[in-house]
Amino acid sequence: MKERARTVQYSQTTITELMIPSYANFGGKIHGGILLSLMDKVAYATASKHAGTYCVTVTVDKVEFLQPVEVGELVSMHASVNYVGRTSLVVGIRVESQNVKTGEIKHTNSSFFTMVAKGDDDKPAVVPKLLLQNKEDVKRFIEAMRMKEIKNAVREQMDDAKSHIEVKNAGEILKDQRCIIEYSK
């Protein structure tokens, strides 16, 4: 049996929500946690549509809060599957807010969510391949693949025994940093 594949377009999802006063932080802008919650929702919807099963969030990468979101604006979360592994998917999200009075639309946030598909047995489930139909699809797939490689390399380097040895040289390593070491060696 030939393995199924799904296009990027198949699972693209947009969720739009009105920003209400109870979503505001102490500064009167929409709280970042509200936006992250909405982003998690759209990441789930997008990944689950592609996988055809329940998906869970594993990591949230490169959350960028570019501009504040105001009470009364409509916020749209545009999400696409950028990459698939065997059981994981990377969902790219672009957040835009629209001022309903002026019609102005601004790009306020971007992020990447890594999701894992779960089967009925609650174990990771194999996801369909991603059918790349244009240069943008290919570009995003390669970018996500490279980001995964970089994250793995950083994780390996941070777990390396070398990081434990560097603590002995902390005074020298941290001499130009804004910290004070105050423990006895």
Image: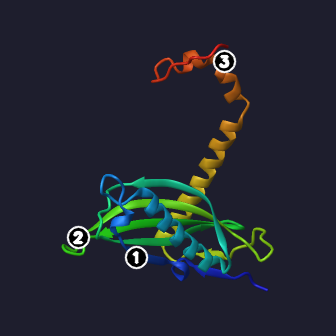
Q: Secondary structure at mark 1?
A: strand
Q: Secondary structure at mark 3?
A: helix
Question: Which residue shows up at 65% across the image and 77% down it?
Answer: 51
Question: Which amino acid type corresponds to the residue marked 3 in the rendered image?
Answer: Lys
Extreme residue toward the bottom, this view: 1
Residue under numbered circle 1: 16
Marks 1 and 2 sit apart, C-alpha to C-alpha, by 15 Å
Question: Which amino acid type corresponds to the residue marked 2 in the rendered image?
Answer: Glu
Question: Which amino acid type corresponds to the residue marked 1 in the rendered image?
Answer: Thr
- Residue 101 or residue 136, whichever sits in front: 101
Q: Residue 92: x, y in percent?
A: 50, 65
Q: Nearer the viewer, mark 3 or mark 1?
A: 1
Is 21 positioned to the left or the right of 35 in the image? left
**Dot 3, how many residues are within 10 Å of its Cα: few (below 14), some (14-19), or many (20+)?**
few
- Residue 99 or residue 14, whichever sits in front: 99
Cβ atoms at labels 1 and 2 below 8 Å apart: no
Question: Which residue shows up at 69% across the image and 41% down it?
Answer: 156
Residue under numbered circle 2: 104
Mark sitting earlier along the chain (1/2): 1
Question: Which residue shows up at 55% across the image and 20% down it?
Answer: 173
Q: Secondary structure at mark 2?
A: loop
